[in-house]
Image: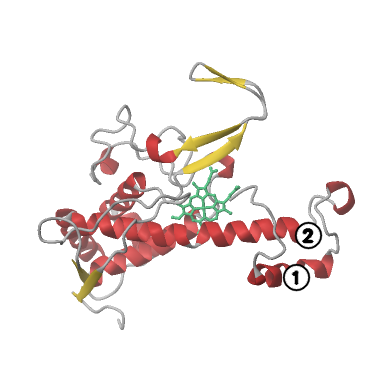
Amino acid sequence: MRGSAYSAKQSYILDTVYQFTNLSCNYTCWDDKLSGINCLNKYPFQFFSQDLFTGGTSTTADAILWILGELVNHPASFKKLREEIDSVVGTERLADEADIPNLPYFQACVKEAMRLHPPVPLFDRVCREDCKLAGHDIPKGITMIMNAYSIMRDPKIWDNPNDFIPERFLTEHDSTKGQNLQIYVPFGGGRRMCPGTNMSSSLINCSVSAMVQCFDWKVVGGDGPDGSKVNMDTKAGVTMSLDKPFMSTPVLHRNLFSA
Ligand code: HEM
C-alpha cells in the first residue's frame, strides 16, 4: 500500500475526492519547504485516499469470509458461539458493539481465524539505523518485510499452529493491540499499525455476530466427503483471499433484522 506509484489515469473517484484539497492549497507536489508540513496537497492525498480505499475494502470482506469459513467448518465452535451470544444478548435482538466485551468466546473465534488467515500477510519497515536482528546485520535504509502469516503459525510460539482452536485466546497470547510484534499481528504493530483496526473490527463484529445469530450455513459443493466443508485454500496475491468462492445457502435460524 505504502509507496504505490501515482498514475494520472488511475482513478476517477480519487481524482474527485482530492479536488477539495486544491481549494486551500494549489501546490502540485509535496514540498515541506514550500507548503509546510500540515498542508495536504493532491499527491499525498491521492496516496492517502488510495491507501484507505485499497486497505479498507477487500481486507475486511476477506476477514469476514475466513472467520465464517472456519466457523462453518467447526460446527462445535459455531454452536458454542451461538450459545454464548444467546446467553449474553438474548434471542430478541442483534448483538451490537457494546456486547462484544461480554463475548469472550466470540472475540477468541475472530482472533483465531485472523491468526490463521491474516488478510494482509506481509508488511514492511525501513531501518532508520544499522542494527542486529537475530544475529543478522541489518544496514540502515534497507526495507524489511515482516511475514505475519508465518509469525502467527510459528510452531515455536503456537501449539498446533495450523489448527483452529479459539480456546487458546481465552488463556494465552492475548495481545491483540499490536504492541507485541512477535506474536499476534494481523493488523501490524507499533506506530504504523493499521489505522483501520477499530473500524474493521466493528464491521467484522457486527457482521459475524449477525451471521451466527440469524443463520445456519449450508455449504454448496464444498470439500469433504459430503461437500459440506468450506474450501480454505488461499488465492495467490498480496492480500489473502479464499481461492474458491464461498458457496453457501443461508438458512434462517432466527429473524432479528426487524427487531
Ligand atoms: C480486517 C481488516 C484489515 C486488516 C487485516 C488490515 C491490516 C493491515 C496491516 C497488516 C497493515 C500494515 C501495518 C503495519 O505496517 O504495521 C495495514 C495498514 C494500513 N491499513 Fe489496514 N487492515 C484492515 C482494514 C483497514 C481499513 C478498514 C482501513 C481504512 C479504512 C485500513 C487502512 C490502512 C492504512 C491507511 C494502512 C497504512 C498505514 C500506514 O502506513 O501508516 N485498513 N493494514
**Residue 7 in the image, given as x and y percentages of width and height:** 70, 59
Left or right: 42 as drawn, with respect to 217 = right
The structure residue drawn at horizontal position 59% and vertical position 36%, both measured from the top left corner, is: 125
* Res. 98 in view: no
Which quadrant would residue 226 be assigned to in this image?
A: bottom left
The structure residue drawn at horizontal position 78% and vertical position 53%, both measured from the top left corner, is: 38
Tell me how the rendering is colored: secondary structure
**Residue 233 in the image, given as x and y percentages of width and height:** 30, 51
Mark 2 beta carbon near ligand 1 (under 8 Å): no
Residue located beneath label 1 in the image = 19
* Res. 103 in view: yes
Residue located beneath label 2 in the image = 41
Which quadrant would residue 18 be assigned to in this image?
A: bottom right
- Considering only order in the chain, which callout, 2 or 1, is on the residue closer to the N terminus? 1
Q: How many marks?
A: 2
Q: For the residues marked 1 and 2, what is the alpha-carbon distance in whole angstroms?
A: 9 Å
The structure residue drawn at horizontal position 28% and vertical position 53%, both measured from the top left corner, is: 232
Residue farthest to the top?
135
**Camera-side residue: 228 or 174?**
228
Count residues near mark 2 (Cα–Cα under 10 Å), then give few for <14, some for 14-19, many for 20+: many
Identified by mark 1, the residue type is Gln
Residue 39 got which mark?
none
**Camera-side residue: 173 or 155?**
155
Which quadrant would residue 159 be assigned to in this image?
A: top left
**Residue 70 in the image, given as x and y percentages of width and height:** 25, 54
Q: Quick check: 19 above or below 149?
A: below
Residue at disc 1, secondary structure: loop
**Camera-side residue: 30 or 95?**
30
